[in-house]
Amino acid sequence: MALLEITNLHVSLEDGTEIVKGVDLAVDTNAKHAIMGANGSGKSTFAYALMGHPAYQVTEGDIRFDGESILEMGADERAQRGLFLAFQYPHAIPGVTVTSFLRSAINAKRKAANGGEEDPIPVKEFRTSLLAAMERLRVPRELAQRYLNDGFSGGEKKRVEILQMAILRPELAIMDETDSGLDIDALRIVSDGVNRLAGPELGVLVITHYSRLLRYIKPNVVHVLVDGRIVRTGGAEVADELERDGYAPYGVEEEAIVGG
Ligand code: ADP
Ligand code: MG
């Protein structure tokens, strides 16, 4: 059984509009999967449903993680079980430094693992682990002392996201790369970080419109999402085809202005 197993997933918006229309997907550790789709194909809706966002209703199918259905779990519990969603904390938190944010995140995970009893990480252990992760991911030291996402560039936000992933050591990382606003610097940070962390302990699912990110991440498996359905699954060559031909061969007409 794969780490993440999604079967016949249907997701609707609050007004009942069905956006994801029967997705099957299995992602294992040591694998990098990409889901590619044009604007409006349902990528973010799918990602939100995996996270457990209450505005996105799963109407049919199942999401199993580590052999257990997570449909009834809130976003926190999913995270504590080892599911990492890169867009979880997109907002600035005034007065909270990157270091204290990361410490709270790790302590929340430890508390859950300890049956709900506080089990804060010893200061020295946290410091060692943070410094090691920063070194490994080439995160400048001064970033750790700044307030989370307060005036951060796109690249700095990505650095913190990757650092959070390194510290929390999830089993599965899901990244919805909205693409717009990701400059080449940010793309490199995400892909270098993912490549450094990827391995036998981690599965990766990158959701993206553009193949340029995948030039660096080099997924093993690429799925094409059209109108809420996976219409094609293949190797890295699928991303190359999309880069060359766009989504037109799948009957998708794209607008000139691209976004999320
Ligand atoms: P993608 O990420 O592939 O661009 P989305 O999942 O964001 O696609 O959107 C799929 C469709 O669902 C679009 O038509 C979008 O307008 C609609 N949609 C998504 N989320 C909402 C929402 N919260 N409220 C209204 N419509 C939404
Ligand atoms: Mg999107």
Image (spheres, rainbow, N blue to C red):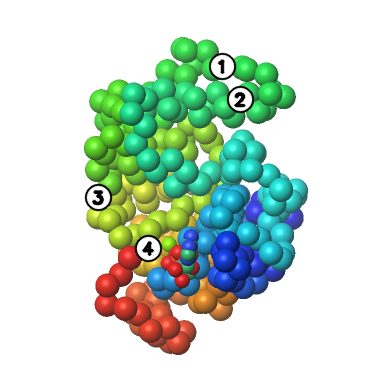
**Which of labels 2 and 4 is toward the front?**
4
Query: Which residue lies under the disc numbered 3?
Result: 185
- CA separation, marks 2 and 4? 34 Å
Look at the numbered disc 4 and give the secondary structure of its residue: loop
Dot 1: within a 10 Å radius of its alpha carbon, few (fewer than 14), some, or many (20 or more) residues? some
- Split into quadrants, the picture shows ligand 2 in the one at bottom left
* Labels 1 & 2 near each other (Cβ < 8 A): yes
- CA separation, marks 1 and 2? 7 Å
Dot 3: within a 10 Å radius of its alpha carbon, few (fewer than 14), some, or many (20 or more) residues? few
Task: Give the quadrant of the C terminus.
Answer: bottom left
Look at the numbered disc 1 and give the secondary structure of its residue: loop
In this image, 223 relative to 245: left or right?
right
Query: Which residue lies under the disc numbered 4?
Result: 260
- CA separation, marks 3 and 1? 35 Å
Q: Which mark is residue 120?
A: 1
Q: Which mark is residue 110?
A: 2
- Which of the two labelled residues, at mark 4 and mark 3, occupies the earlier sequence position? 3
Look at the numbered disc 2 and give the secondary structure of its residue: helix
Look at the numbered disc 3 and give the secondary structure of its residue: helix
- Which of the two labelled residues, at mark 1 and mark 2, occupies the earlier sequence position? 2
